[in-house]
Amino acid sequence: MDHFAIKNGVMHAEDVPLPRIAEEVGTPVYVYSRATLERHARVFREALDDVPDKLIAFAVKANPNLSVLKVLQRQGYGADVVSVGEMRRALAAGMAPENIVFSGVGKTRAELIAALEAGIGQFNIESEEEGVELAEVAREMGKEARCTLRINPDVDAGTHDKISTGKADNKFGVPISEAGQIFGKLAGEQGVNLRGVAVHIGSQLADLAPLENAFTKLGELVAALRGAGHTITHVDLGGGLGVPYKQGEELPSPAEYGKMVARLTQDWGVKLIFEPGRVIAGNAGVLLTRVVRVKRGIKDPFVIVDAAMNDLARPALYGAYHDFTAVEPSGADMTANIVGPICETGDTFAMGRLCDKLVAGDLAVFRTAGAYGATMASSYNSRGFVAEVLVDGDKFAVVADRIDASSIMDAERVPEWLD
Ligand code: LLP
């Protein structure tokens, strides 16, 4: 459920008609709904009511906008970060350092130092090498890093290859077959307090079975580690729950996920950490765009919109489907190719798509763009960075300015020897 709906013939975000935002802020622009973010945060939290001790850490990579993070901080969420840049955003949004977990295979020494200085709650160590380095850095700083070891459970998440993370040949975590031995080695290192394990097998999961499989393996590992004399108090179950991108698409609900988790983990006796991203933010945002022109095609016409693959990369990168609907639908429809203005064929949002009839100047939205949307934008074709707006009831605010192409050019220099 989200708060983007047609009222009196015009699509609104909550109580704000989208044409008003287009007029005042211009297009393309991402529009987020606070009520939807809050609803999703609440639904996910309530789904885990049967898990007594937990931290829900929003995966900042899904939507790092400061105001979005602030909304979630006020819902009691912490943050899962994968860079110091994300950590600084979480802190700036008021998230407590102890509610921040740091994942990622390539944390640099400088990042380890910065995160230790900030006193974050947990490092998810992704390799023996990283654990040894973190221990050394922590010792030098006279600190102790609270950690889990990320396990690669060798489970096929059944999602797009580029966003699958839990297969043996993916770069993430340590092989489950070596986990006991690596855990033993790192647990003996001074400077780290290795107190648990972590797993994250992929994103946009449409089926709970791979998650259940991974969590079951993790439960067995926890028992084995305890059997070997280790104290395990924390288990991080990652994120990954999928969201519907097509109207009517059925995906496992947070409630079903929560039930499965509660059933599997009831005897673990640990604090559980969750890292949801898409399920919180995905359907809380749309990309609002204007039709530049409609061009005749050999078969179907091309609806050329002013948003492009630099603003919303998912279709070009993963062949992802985003619903595309008119802001003021006339009731008529058309079959069209939806494309952006960028000079490569990859800048195609959809081919042969049945959609609302559109003409030049009309507004339309790509839906489910609140996660992995603006954050994956680039300035390709010198198009600048897209603006972001947050709606709250009948008011809205620009929460990220459009960065135009000339400001980006201002950061460049031509050395005098080239002049
Ligand atoms: N935790 C870790 C360690 C992750 O790597 C990720 C996502 C998450 C949590 C959050 O996963 P979620 O709940 O959002 O599925 N750009 C891609 C998605 C990449 C996801 C990367 N990791 C896309 O647009 O589909």
Image: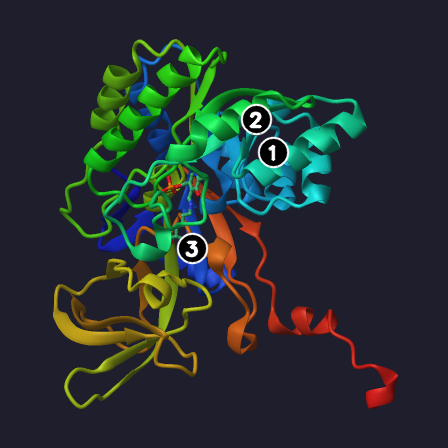
Quadrant of the rendered structure where residue 35 is?
top left
Residue identified by numbered label 1: 131
For mark 3, does the 10 Å Cα neighbourhood hold few (<14), some (14 to 19), or many (20 or more) residues? many
Marks 3/1 in contact by CB < 8 Å: the verdict is no
Mark nearer the viewer, 3 or 1 = 1
Residue at x 64% of width, y 34% of height: 132
Which of the two labelled residues, at mark 2 and mark 3, occupies the earlier sequence position?
Answer: 2
Quadrant of the rendered structure where residue 237 is?
top left
Residue at x 32% of width, y 41% of height: 154
Q: Is residue 138 visible?
A: yes
Quadrant of the rendered structure where residue 410 is?
bottom right
Residue at x 24% of width, y 58% of height: 323
Marks 2/1 in contact by CB < 8 Å: the verdict is yes
Q: CA distance from mark 2 to mark 3?
A: 40 Å
Quarter of the displayed picture in which ligand 1 can be seen? top left
**Residue type for callout 1:** Gly
Question: Is label 1 within 8 A of ligand 1 (CB to nearest ligand atom)?
Answer: no
- Residue 391: percent from the left, percent from the top? 44, 43
Q: What is the number of the mark on residue 373?
A: 3
Q: CA distance from mark 2 to mark 1?
A: 9 Å
Which of the two labelled residues, at mark 3 and mark 1, occupies the earlier sequence position?
Answer: 1
Residue identified by numbered label 2: 185
**Residue type for callout 3:** Gly
- Residue 220: percent from the left, percent from the top? 32, 21
Marks 2/3 in contact by CB < 8 Å: the verdict is no
Which of the two labelled residues, at mark 2 and mark 1, occupies the earlier sequence position?
Answer: 1
With respect to residue 272, does 84 lie above or below?
Answer: below
The N terminus lies in quadrant:
top left
Dot 3 falls on a residue whose secondary structure is loop
